[in-house]
Image (cartoon, rainbow, N blue to C red):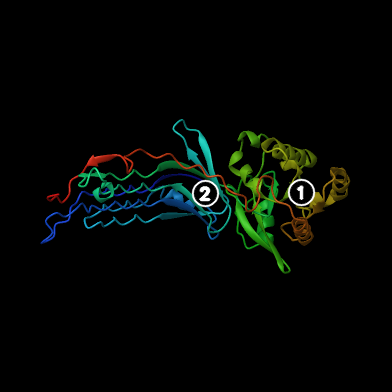
């Protein structure tokens, strides 16, 4: 699946502090000079607008940052472990998997370059030079580095598109997208040819917008039937919906009402999203004959409606212009506010000694 992935992340362990004493010629009473360990590297998820899917995580799903180096004598602090940046597409929802299987929201990656800390590196342990006090001039203890944070994350990609095409299977959604953009979704004369959402850029004059072909909706989709929740979540972030209907359907009005009902049952308020109703396949002989009857039936819907043929292009330009007009009126999807402060839940530490929790350590020793 290209829009869901489960990955394991682990921050690097901190380096250990060291016990060491100065041993130089003509310096008979060298003091402690054990350095601190370096901090472990952290793992960040970074938004990348060049990515469109989570397909890459099918081949690699474990990420570990480098650990910090141990401290050395002469008060030398160990090298810090390098941070690891994992690129994800925009629209990725990040959730952490708890021990009981429940999921905790971590963040949403919505902007290019946005960085989300998902596994912090462990702190390096203190060397014995750090432990010198008035009552202990020659400490022989050093701290172990902390263990880096670790977690299992569930990544869900919710497409960020300006316009989403929704409707029953085989209503012509893929044909419409391929007709107005350079996208090349699979097109065939059987239902569910589109099993994964497809994005395309529609250019109208000097303006453009992103349009998504959402796999077909069936009755009970909000309960997971058909492709169910695997595709409905992509509708959440679209600003305008084009509800496409098969003009050859004998139950056209029922089809439209069922789609509306599935949208509302999936997410309250989704039914009220700016929407255009388009009847497709008017180029077919049977549809042409009943076109006037369709117009009369559609008059009572109270939505902008168009009659198009995605195959021949008839009426398509007017439909795209109407979509651009609704987009220009502004407005964002519910609960998707640009620039909001993302609440970040840090994964719990996996254990390990803190810098203040010391154990005797080996190292170069000399007379205190």
Q: Position of residue 353 (x, y in %)?
A: 31, 40
Residue annotated with mark 2:
2
Q: Secondary structure at mark 1?
A: strand
Residue 250, horizontal then vertical, whole percent:
78, 41
The answer to whether the residue labelled 1 contacts the one labelled 2, judged by CB atoms less than 8 Å apart, is no
Residue at 78% in and 42% down = 252
- Looking at this view, name the residue that lies furthest to the bottom: 206
- The residue under the point 52% across, 49% down is 2
Q: Is residue 318 visible?
A: yes
Give how far apart the Cα atoms at labels 1 and 2 are: 27 Å
User: On the picture, is 229 further left or further right than 124?
Assistant: right
> What is the tally of numbered marks visible in this picture?
2
Q: Which of marks 2 and 1 precedes in the sequence?
A: 2
Numbered label attached to residue 30: none
Question: Quick check: 350 above or below 19?
Answer: above
Q: Is residue 116 above or below residue 318?
A: above
> Is 112 or 131 nearer to us in this picture?
131
Q: Quadrant of residue 23?
A: bottom left
Dot 2: element? loop
Q: Which mark is residue 275?
A: 1
Residue at 30% in and 39% down:
357
Q: Image quadrant of residue 355? A: top left
């Amino acid at each position: 699946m290209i829009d869901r992935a489960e990955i394991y992340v682990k921050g690097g362990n901190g380096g250990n502090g060291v016990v060491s004493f100065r041993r130089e010629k003509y310096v008979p009473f060298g003091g402690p000079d054990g350095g601190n360990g370096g901090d472990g590297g952290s793992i960040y998820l970074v938004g990348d607008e060049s990515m469109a899917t989570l397909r890459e995580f099918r081949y690699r799903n474990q990420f570990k940052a480098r650990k910090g180096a141990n401290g050395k004598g002469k008060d030398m602090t160990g090298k810090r472990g390098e941070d690891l940046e994992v690129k994800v597409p925009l629209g990725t929802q990040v959730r952490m998997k708890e021990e009981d299987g429940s999921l905790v929201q971590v963040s949403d990656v919505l902007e290019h370059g946005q960085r989300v800390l998902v596994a912090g590196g462990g702190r390096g342990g203190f060397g014995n030079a750090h432990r010198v006090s008035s009552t202990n001039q020659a400490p022989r203890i050093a701290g172990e580095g902390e263990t880096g944070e670790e977690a299992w994350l569930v990544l869900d990609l919710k497409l960020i598109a300006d316009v989403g095409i929704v409707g029953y299977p085989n209503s012509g959604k893929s044909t419409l997208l391929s007709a107005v953009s350079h996208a090349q979704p699979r097109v065939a004369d059987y239902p569910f040819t589109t099993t994964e959402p497809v994005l395309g850029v529609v250019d109208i004059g000097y303006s453009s917008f992103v349009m998504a072909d959402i796999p077909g909706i069936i009755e009970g989709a909000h309960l997971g039937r058909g492709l169910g929740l695997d595709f409905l979540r992509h509708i959440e972030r679209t600003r305008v919906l084009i509800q496409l209907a098969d003009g050859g359907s004998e139950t056209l009005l029922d089809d439209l009402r069922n789609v509306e009902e599935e949208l509302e049952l999936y997410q309250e308020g989704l039914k009220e999203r700016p929407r255009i109703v388009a009847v497709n396949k008017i180029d077919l002989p049977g549809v042409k004959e009943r076109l006037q009857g369709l117009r009369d039936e559609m008059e009572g819907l109270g939505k902008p409606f168009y009659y198009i043929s995605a195959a021949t292009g008839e009426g398509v330009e007017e439909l795209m212009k109407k979509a651009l007009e609704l987009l220009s009126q502004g407005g964002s999807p519910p609960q998707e506010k640009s620039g909001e402060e993302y609440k970040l839940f840090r994964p719990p530490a996996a254990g390990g000694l803190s810098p203040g929790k010391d154990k005797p350590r080996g190292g170069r020793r000399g007379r205190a």
